[in-house]
Image: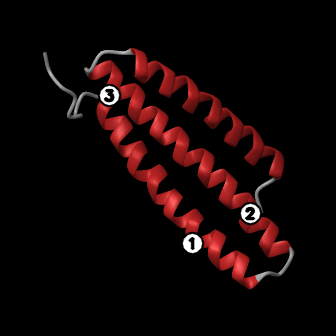
Amino acid sequence: MIDVSVLKIVGFASLALLVIGWLTVSLLAPGKARSRVAWLAATCMYLALLCLFTNLFQEAFHAESLLGMIAFGFLGAIFLGGVVVSTVKTVGELVGRGSAIQH
């Protein structure tokens, strides 16, 4: 099991980066920089949600709640997929293989 303090640190750091990213995206003009920040913020969003549902899954596991483990495990798997996809897209944007608008 993952220590709750690690999940909290990663989750809250991801939320902070998400808010900063969203504010930055709202102020930037369309282009490569905006696209890169948007994908990074999306990755932070999925990571924060993954931390939340991982913690809830662990609580359900300790409470021996099968329904909770199934529900939170399913949601955790969905958001894990989101982390993977958005990370691949973020790396693609950072190395220049993204689909940002070219001016």
- Give the x, y percent position of residue 15: 63, 36
Tell me which corner region of the image, top left, top right, bottom left or bottom right, holds residue 66: bottom right
Amino acid marked by disc 1: Phe
The residue sitting at 24% across, 34% down in the picture is 98
Indicate the secondary structure of the residue bearing disc 2: helix
Left or right of residue 68: residue 31: left
**Which residue in the protein does label 1 denote?**
74
- From this view, report whether residue 41 is shown above or below residue 102: below
- From this view, report whether residue 96 is shown above or below residue 86: above
User: Which residue, as the protein is rendered here, is positioned at the far right?
Assistant: 63
Which of pointers 2 and 3 lies earlier in the amino acid sequence? 3
Instruction: Report, in whole angstroms, how far the alpha carbon at label 2 lies from the one at label 3.
Output: 32 Å
Tell me the crowding category of disc 1: few under 14, some 14 to 19, or many 20 or more residues within 10 angstroms, Cα based. some
**Which residue in the protein does label 3 denote?**
35
Amino acid marked by disc 3: Ser
- From this view, report whether residue 56 is shown above or below residue 45: below
Indicate the secondary structure of the residue bearing disc 1: helix
Instruction: Report, in whole angstroms, how far the alpha carbon at label 1 lies from the one at label 2.
Output: 11 Å
Tell me the crowding category of disc 3: few under 14, some 14 to 19, or many 20 or more residues within 10 angstroms, Cα based. many
Indicate the secondary structure of the residue bearing disc 3: helix
The residue sitting at 48% across, 41% down in the picture is 43
**Which residue in the protein does label 2 denote?**
56
User: Which residue, as the protein is rendered here, is positioned at the far bottom?
Assistant: 66
Quadrant containing the C terminus is top left
The residue sitting at 25% across, 20% down in the picture is 31
- Give the x, y percent position of residue 4: 81, 51
Amino acid marked by disc 2: Leu
Left or right of residue 103: residue 93: right
User: Which residue, as the protein is rendered here, is positioned at the far front?
Assistant: 26
Q: Tell me whether circle 3 and circle 1 mark residues in contact (CB < 8 Å).
A: no
